[in-house]
Image: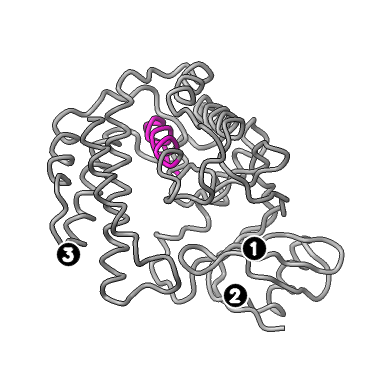
Amino acid sequence: MTVPGLDLDRLAARLSEAGVTDGPLTAELIEGGKSNLTYIVRDGVRAVVVRRPPLGHVLATAHDMGREFRVMGALQDTDVPVPRMYHFCDDAEVVGAPFYVMEYVEGTPTRLTPEVGEHLADVLARLHVIDPAEVGLGDFGRPEGFLDRQVRRWKRQLDASRSREVAGIDELYARLAKDLPVSGAPAIVHGDFKLGNTLIRDGRVAAVLDWEMSTLGDPLTDLALFLLYADFADLDVGAPGGEVDVTALAAHYAERSGRDTSRLGWYVGLACFKLAVITEGIHFRFTQGLTVGDGFAGIGDIVAPLVERGLREV
């Protein structure tokens, strides 16, 4: 059996040696090549999940398998639902890149209903009340100057992908840069918290996945991005299945986390800027014929509404 990105014979030998699986393996790719590759791997008795960087990727810092493995391992005995971590391998000779193996957690695609949204807000609050040092993540990032670095980072990304005039986007940047909030206590930040990066079972979060952007920083960046995804369903999997009240979700999070959300509008503005820049970059690559797959033709139309929303918020 041939599976792109995995040498099953070498993988079987490594996982057998590590006591994770036993005997020959089969594998199924369950996530395509825009980000890290994820496979269900079976030995005939049990199933596990293997995750590795995209094929042909050479910048290991952008797809840090060790980082994802470390943060989920640190969280597995907390109130944040994550898969159990079984094995990390930094030997690129096995499958062509570093990889890790984790528990296979069952979950089903779902829509963002009010009930699911409230539970997502609960889980996010649970993440943000964890003391990073108590779970061995005290050195996981540089929280000092976090917001300033975020604003400058996405401005650099914007400048690198300009291909057309986007009304208001420079004004949004200027407003963000001019009036940074004072961050509260730093927390473990997921970096891309949304419905599409979780597994849902029976209306509740069974596991939070895709921690490749995680760090220590200002947790309200997570909240704002989550709320924005809830409003702009086209940016995430599944349109809202009911009236999802993002104001109520924000209040629910604030109650559960104890965080001051009085400057939440600024954070939503930053989330709008970030997603507008990311989306504009995808639009630029589409116009250059550099995207693969369907669904990119209209992505540039999302940029203007994001910028307009950001300007209303900041």
Mark 1–mark 3 Cα distance, whole angstroms, equals 37 Å
Name the residue carrying label 2.
95
- Reading the chain from its start, which is encountered first: label 1 or label 3? 1
On the image, the x and y values in percent for residue 120 come to 56, 34
Seen at 62% across and 44% down, the residue is 73
Where is the N terminus found, in terms of image quarters? bottom right
Q: Indicate which disc residue 144 carries.
A: none
Q: Amino acid type of disc 3?
A: Ser
In this image, 49 relative to 171: left or right? right
The amino acid beneath tag 1 is Val
Mark 1 vs mark 3, foreground winner is 3
Point out residue 264 in the picture as x, y percentages from the top left corner.
33, 25
Say which quarter of the image contains residue 224. top left
Q: Nearer the viewer, residue 249 or 56?
A: 249
Check contact, mark 2 vs mark 1: CB within 8 A. yes
Q: Which residues are magenta?
A: 214-229
Residue matched to label 3: 163
Q: CA distance from mark 2 to mark 3?
A: 38 Å
Q: Position of residue 271 (x, y in %)?
A: 33, 40
Question: Which labelled disc corresponds to residue 50?
Answer: 1
Looking at the image, residue 131 sits to the left or right of residue 200; the answer is left
Q: Are marks 1 and 3 in contact (CB under 8 Å)?
A: no
146 or 227, which lies in front?
227
Q: Is residue 157 above or below residue 189?
A: below
Q: Main secondary structure of the magenta part?
A: helix
Secondary structure at badge 2 equals: loop
* Sequence-earlier tag: 2 or 1: 1
Task: Measure the C-alpha gap from mark 2 to mark 1.
Answer: 11 Å
